[in-house]
Structures are given as C-alpha cells and as structure tokens.
Image: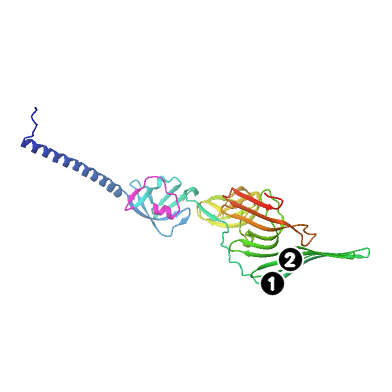
Amino acid sequence: MARPFRLTTPARLGLILALLLGSAAVAAEDDGASAEDSAGAASAETALEPALLEVIVNGQRGTEPTEFLRGPTGGLYVSTAFLRAWRIRVPAAVPIRYEGEAYYPASSIPTLRLAVDQAAQSVAIDADAGAFEGQSAALGETDFMEMTPPSSGAFLNYDLFVEHVRGQTSAAGAFEAGIFTRMGAGSAGFIASAGGHRTRVTRLETTWTIDRPSHMTSIRIGDGISSAGPGAAPVRFAGVQYARNFGVQPGYLTMPLPIASGSAAIPSIVDVYVNSTLQGQQPVQPGPFELSNIPVPSGGGTVQLVVRDLLGREIVSEQSYYASAQLLRGGLHDFSYEAGLLREAFGRRSNQYGSFFASMTHRYGFSDYVTAEATAQASESRQM
C-alpha cells in the first residue's frame, strides 16, 4: 500500500506565501486598470472646456446664453438639453459625459452647420428642416360649444298655388305646422286641393322628435323613414325610431379627412387651400409638420399648402386627395333601430297602414379606411 503524501512545514509556509502574493498581484492589476480608466475619463473631461455662447438658430435668437463644450481642436459639443429645447433630433452617436450631462459632438449632426463668432461670443446654427422633430396640428380645431337651451314656440309653413282657367278656379297647397318645447318638437304636414266642386285634404307625416345633443342621438315617435342599409331600400312607417343623429352637433365631421404634410426651416404660417379656396391658416414651428382636420368636400380634389416665413418667403406644395362620405372616421358608430307599421299609399291616403315592421342598421368605422355596415329587416311578408 502506497504511503500518503504529506507536506513539510517549510513547504506549507511557501505555498501559503505564494497564494498571498498572487492575490495581491491580481488586486494590484485591477486597481491599476481602474486607475487607468479613471485617469482616462478625467483626462477626457479636462480636455474639454466649457463655453457660454449666445445662440442663433436659423435666424432665431435664444432667450439666454447656452453652455457648450469646446474640444482640443476647437470643435463644439452640444448638450441633450439644448437639442430638446430647440426640438432638434438627438443623434445616434455615443455621447460624452461632462458633469453628469450628455454632450454630442456637433460634427455628428450633419444637418447642423455652426459658425462661431469669438468676438461676439455667439454661435449661429443653420439647421435643415429635417433636423427638427416632427409636429402635428389640427386645422381650426375647436371645442364644441354647449348647446343653447331650447325655448318654446310654434311655426307654420305653406306653399299655395291658384289657377283660373275658362271660368273655373282651382287651388292647391302644401302645409306644415309645428311646435317646439324643452321636451321635444312636433310637426305635422298635409296637402289640400280645392276645385271642380271637390275638396280634398291628405295627411302626410306627423312626428314628435326628441333630440339628445350630448349623445348625438334622436328619438322619433310617429311617421318616419327607415334607414337604408346595404341591399335594403328605405320604407315609410309609423312607429318608433331610435337612431344616431350627428346633425344635432353642427360642424361635427363624420368622414375621414385628408392629412397634408410639409416642412418649415423657421417659424412660419401655413395657408391651406382646398380646390383653390382658402380654408384656414396654421402657425408651425421649424421642422416637418402634418396638418389634419382639413375640411374638404366628398370626392377628389387638391390641397395646396403655402408656407410663408417671417421674411415673406413662400414655399408652395400641392397634394391630391379623395374623400368619401360613405366612410366613417375610425371609432365612430352609426346606428338606427325602427319598429312600427308599414305606411301604404303615402300622399294619397291619410291613415292606411300595413303589417308590422322592424329594422336594425349598424355602421362602424374600424379605421379611416375601413367602415363595416350591416342591416336586418323583418315584416310579415319579407325578411332580410
């Protein structure tokens, strides 16, 4: 059997001493590397000198001097705070840290051209329009005003026609009477004719309407016309209808409107023309911009943007558009529910009704480009 190997006392002391010296050497190397890194960072900071300069960007003078860093070769470094204050895009370059703030070399932003005036202690920056962050604005965007509380009153509309031929006189007329209160509005229409020893009066529509502007809906009780969905024809009926009514908020836009884009190098005013007609003006800041909510008629046409700066210089651009009233803006929901008796011989008989009728129509704008519509109708002789 082999004898176990054992270290003598001097060998043990030598091994322990070697381990201690090796650990100290590694620690010394780590401390040396850290010291070198700290010295490198310190030398990088000491190589940069702060410079307080007055700023002029595209002819706009800043409100107060800005601190820059000046490199050994005279190049300037700009801070992240400066770029954000002037809405200039932050470059993808690796920044240099100076007193806790990130600075970027101006040479890393090719869309900026700097000219330093040592005597005036100022820097003039000429920036392209693409150097700035984009912006969006809605043309003529205003909050809806509160509706005026309704008052009470009444009205009468009439249209008369009288004819005298060969000693005989005949007359005809269309009449509409209505009242309006805080609880709703009622109207009744009829036609009448007289002549040839015969007088006739025929009722047309009698309806009580309750509008709800805050919900953009209306409730109609009496005679009405059903909504026409895909493949369905509107019919006259007498009953109840509950439907969306965007008309109770005048000026509310339901169809998607085109978005026009452009750019400006300095603060400017944009005149927006639709089919050569001025529709509005919008102030914009330097950089690319998008204008939405441009009122256009349905169909095709052109939108013209005239960008005018403070010096009166103009840049004109033109874009084509196509708008359809059949589309709903994304998120809008249009609907109608009807139930009642079908109206027969309208305009010839006052009170002739048929079978029971019910209808439902829904339209929803999933986006500004996709609108879905569905309808269902049912009566005694027809279902769809």
Label 1 crowding class (10 Å Cα cut-off): few <14, some 14-19, many 20+? few
Q: Residue tagged by mark 1?
A: 153
Q: Write the residue at 11% across / 39% down.
A: 16
* Bounds of the magenta segment: 80-100
Q: Is residue 82 in the magenta section?
A: yes
Q: Residue at the far right: name it.
A: 166
Distance Cα–Cα, label 2 vs label 1: 15 Å
Element under disc 1: strand
Left or right: 173 as drawn, with respect to 105: right
Left or right: 51 as drawn, with respect to 249: left
Vertical placement of residue 117 versus 198, above or below: above
Q: Position of residue 299 (x, y in %)?
A: 66, 49
Q: Residue tagged by mark 2?
A: 188
Query: Depth-wise, is mark 2 or mark 1 nearer the camera?
Result: 2
- Relative to the observer, which residue lies in front, 267 or 26? 26
Q: Position of residue 18 (x, y in %)?
A: 12, 38
Q: Position of residue 283 (x, y in %)?
A: 54, 57
Left or right: 224 as drawn, with respect to 197: left
Q: Position of residue 352 (x, y in %)?
A: 77, 60
Quadrant of res 348:
bottom right
Q: Residue at the far left: name it.
A: 9
Quarter of the image with the N terminus is top left
Amino acid tagged 1:
Gly
- Relative to the observer, which residue lies in front, 1 or 245? 1
Amino acid tagged 2:
Ala
